[in-house]
Image: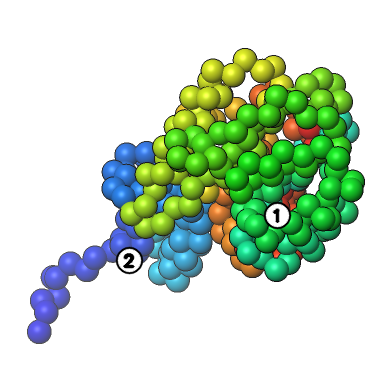
Amino acid sequence: MPSSRTRRRPRGVLTGIAALAVAALLLWHGMLPDIGGAASLVESFLPWAAALIAVLGLSALFRLSLFAGLGVATAAAVWWSLFGTAMLPAASVGAPAFTVVSENIRAGNPEAASIARDLAARSPDLIALQELDATTRSAVSDVLDPAYPYRAIVGTVGLWSTHPLSGEQRLDLGLGWDRALRVDVDTPGGITRVYAVHLASVRPGESATRDEMLKELSGTIAGDDATRLLVIGDFNTATTDRTLAPLLTQLGEKPDSELGLGFTWPASFPAARLDHALTRGLATVSSVVLPENGSDHRGIEVGLR
């Protein structure tokens, strides 16, 4: 029979320690070793630490533990400091001079034409698409070509525009085959250099190709002296991923104009923001994630000036 003098562990110690561990992960995730892209994967879904904090909060409440409550409060404060502002709708800064939509339409998608019609119905000035293949390219072109007389298609990436294009350049970004393009667009307010990209996919243990493409893209942007510049497409990573950091030191991305973190993938239940519109020398007036329309990604629309 246990002695009456046996000390009992204070209630909620494990919950409090777990909450502090979550706070530490949020603050110092950059110290995680990136073995086989594991840290990159964790960082891409880092905002979902909020769900874990909520569960720990319920545990602290159930146990009526001050220590657990303080631990959860600390984790929640750290989370809010990192993602709270981004979750709130961004303030409007006026009307856009031109708008751009982008979406990964999924290779072989029988709904490619319907997706193209859906995007064109929004009347953007530019439409950037990824995962074009022989089937989807033809279906999309049939829909977009009449209203978008200027176009550039490289590999599986395409850009349709209502404004003249010039200086098109194919880019492989170290992949070995072209999967990105650079072109100057005669947009209202001046020439805008547009990079339409689709970086390699990431799977457990397979992130090296994506990382190399990001490195090449960052170096290319560093050497580009264009005053107005837009890089748009499917990056297959989130802004919380360390591999995107070198590019984000050169370019910016405005938070979504609606409540939330602007997740784009998977379309049925978005859990990460893999699709981006990064700018330099342009003001992002609006940025929204589009409704599900038949692809495995949700599209994005940005208004620029």
* Residue located farthest toward the bottom when viewing the structure as drawn: 1
For the residue carrying disc 1, how many other residues have a C-alpha within 10 Å: few (<14), some (14-19), or many (20+)? many
Residue 164 in sight: yes
Q: Secondary structure at mark 1?
A: helix
- For disc 1, the marked residue is 137
Gap in angstroms between the C-alphas marked 2 and 1: 61 Å
Q: Quadrant of residue 65?
A: bottom left
Q: Amino acid at mark 1?
A: Arg
1 relative position to 37: left or right: left
Residue 23 in sight: no
Q: Residue at x 41, y 57 (%)?
A: 203
Q: Quadrant of the C terminus?
A: top right
186 relative position to 201: left or right: right
Q: Percent position (x, y) of residue 166?
A: 75, 26
- For disc 2, the marked residue is 11
Residue closest to the eye, 73 or 137: 137
Q: Residue at x 83, y 50 (%)?
A: 144
Q: Amino acid at mark 2?
A: Arg
Q: Percent position (x, y) of residue 124?
A: 84, 43
Residue closest to the eye, 251 or 142: 142
Q: Is residue 248 above or below residue 101?
A: above
